[in-house]
Image (cartoon, rainbow, N blue to C red):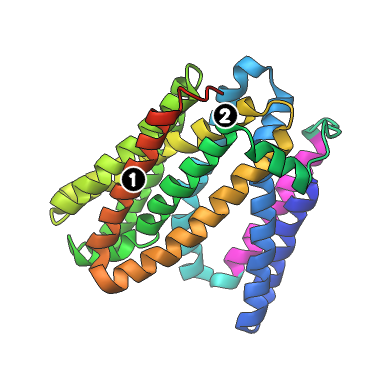
Amino acid sequence: ALMVLTALLVISGVVAAAATNLTTLLAARLLLGIGIGGFWSMMAAMAMRLVPGRLLPRALSIVFTGVSIATISAAPIGAYLGALYGWRTVFALSAAIGALTLLIQMVTLPKLPPQSKPNLRTLLELLRRPSVRLVVATILIAISGHFAGFTYVRPFLEQVPALKIEIISLALLAYGAGGFFGNLIGAAITARSAEVSVVVGSGLTALTAFGLVAFGASPWAAGIGVALWGFAFGAFPVGVQTWIVRAAPDQPEGASGLIVAAFQIAIASGAVLGGLLVDHLGPTGVIGYTGIMTSIGTLLVLGFGRRNPA
C-alpha cells in the first residue's frame, strides 16, 4: 500500500510537469493529496510495526524530522530551481525524487501483512473510546486554529511588520528550523507523556499567536514569533500520533486513519475559515483566532486528559 501511494506521488509529478491547463494541474494535485494523505494515515502504524513499543516516540520523531527538513529545504530549493529552469522542471524533479524513494522502499522495507482490517465499523468503534474521542476533538480544534492562521502568515508578515519578500522567506525558513527542533523536544517529552507533548505544543502555539497579535508590528518580534510557532507546532504531531496508537494498540491502522481524517478536516476547515477572517478582520484577526482555538485545545487536554488515560 505504501508503495502504491508513493507511485501516486511520482505520477502526480509527471502529470503536473506535462500539464497544459488548470484542470490537468488540479488533477495532478489531487493524486498528490491522495498519496500524501494515505502515507500519513499509515505512518504511525508502520513505525509501530518496525520498532519496539518503547522506541515509538523516537521513531516518530525521526519521521517528523524528515518532514521538518523537507519544510526547510523544499520551498527555497523549488523556488530557486523554478526561477532558473521553470516550474515544469521542478515538478519533474519531484517525480524523480519520488521514484528514488519508491526504489529505496522496495529494497529496504520488510513484508508487513496487516494485523487488522479496519473499516467504517472499526472507525465508529474507535470513536466510542474516550481517549480516541479526546485526541480527535483536540486535533479538530487546535489544528484548525493553527492552519487558519498559518495559511495566511505571509499576508500577516507583508502587512503588519511590512517585511520584504526576502525577509519573509527567511522567517518561513526559521519556522521550518523551529519545527525541526520542536520534533526533537516533542519526542523526548512524548517518551514520558504524549498528553504533555500535546499540551506543550498547542499551549506554546497559543502564546506565540497572542504574542504576534500584541507585538507583531516589530520585524524582530514577528520573525522570532514565527520561529517559535514552528517550534511549538513541531511538538504537536509527534504527541497526537503516539497518543492515539497507544489509545488503540489493537487497531493501529484504523486509529492512524482516523487521526489523518481529523487532520485533513481541520486543515481544510481552518484554511477556509481563515480566509473569511482575513477578509473581515485582517491578518491580525486570524492570528488572534489561532491563539483562541489552540488555547481551547490545550484546556481540553488539561481538563479531560487525565480522566481518559491512553
Q: Position of residue 114 (x, y in %)?
A: 83, 34
Q: Are marks 2 and 1 in contact (CB under 8 Å)?
A: no
Q: Residue at x 50, y 43 (%)?
A: 137
Q: Is residue 156 above or below residue 44?
A: below
Q: Nearer the viewer, residue 52 or 176?
A: 52
User: Is residue 264 found left or right of 108 in the rendered image?
Assistant: left
Q: Residue at x 64, y 37 (%)?
A: 128
Q: Position of residue 249 (x, y in %)?
A: 69, 25
Disc 2 from disc 1: Cα separation: 26 Å
Q: Amino acid at mark 1?
A: Ala
Helix, strand or loop at mark 2: helix
Q: Amino acid at mark 2?
A: Thr
Q: Quadrant of residue 124?
A: top right
Camera sees residue 2: no
Instruction: Name the main secondary structure of what is drawn in magenta.
Output: helix
- Which part of the image, by quadrant, shows the C terminus? top right
Residue that mark 1 sits on = 174
Helix, strand or loop at mark 1: helix
